[in-house]
Amino acid sequence: MEDWRQVFAVNVEGPWRLCQIFAPKMAERGFGRIINIGSVYGIQGGNPALYPGMDWDIAPYFVSKHAVHGIAHYLAPWLAKSGVTINTLHPGGFAGSEMNEKAMSERASGVSEMEKAFNAAVPMGRIGGADDIKAAAVFMASPGSKYMTGQEVVVDGGWSAW
């Protein structure tokens, strides 16, 4: 249970507390954009075949990322009239994540087994990069997203479309 507590403290309690601190200040100004960072695993189950040889209990991560979007669903109607929107950005597999960094460090040369598995599972045929997620985040933070609240934006190269 300690794993669950640690994961929930970071992935759920952290965003919830930040919302409690900043949402009222944004509402006073009449404008704000809250973007919670979820995961593609916050909208679907995982595929153990993508993590060969990893001894990692991912249940707390999955459940916590579902809860992250629950925060947005709960707060969206409460904040909407104040000009504050809250949405969840769900990245898929991205270079630079802890799991991907572990896989990259394990490869001597070429492409790791984990990276091959991810690339094969993504219709676009590759793991995402920083530029892929940046554009979605910039839009979600912009005035152009003013009529979008309580929503989920998935940036995963089509993985969740399977």
Image: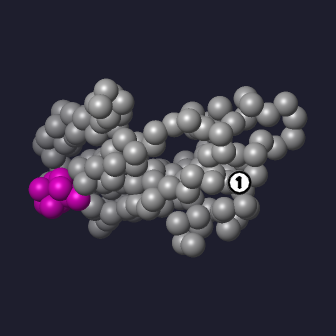
User: Above or below — where is 98 with respect to 80?
Assistant: above
Quadrant housing residue 145:
bottom left
Kindly tell me whether residue 14 is visible in this rendering: no
Residue at 31%, 27% in the rendered image: 2
In the rendered image, residue 78 lying in the magenta stretch gets the answer yes
Q: Is residue 100 left or right of residue 125?
A: left
Magenta region: which residues?
Answer: 73-81
Residue at 34%, 38% in the rendered image: 11
Quadrant of the drawing holding the C terminus: bottom right
Give x and y (percent) for residue 83. Answer: 20, 55
Give x and y (percent) for residue 62. Answer: 40, 48
Secondary structure beneath dot 1 equals helix
Kindly tell me whether residue 133 is visible in this rendering: yes
Residue at 12%, 56% in the rendered image: 78
Residue with the mark numbered 1? 117
Q: Nearer the viewer, residue 82 or 59?
A: 59
User: Above or below — where is 28 with respect to 82?
Assistant: above
User: Above or below — where is 105 with respect to 75?
Assistant: above
Q: Is the magenta stretch mostly helix, strand or loop?
A: helix
Amino acid type, callout 1:
Ala
Q: Is residue 65 left or right of residue 58?
A: left
Residue at 85%, 30% in the rendered image: 108
Quadrant of the drawing holding the N terminus: top left
Give x and y (percent) for residue 96. Answer: 62, 36
Q: Residue furthest bottom?
A: 162
Q: In this view, does 80 lie to the left or right of 46?
A: left
In the rendered image, residue 17 lying in the magenta stretch gets the answer no
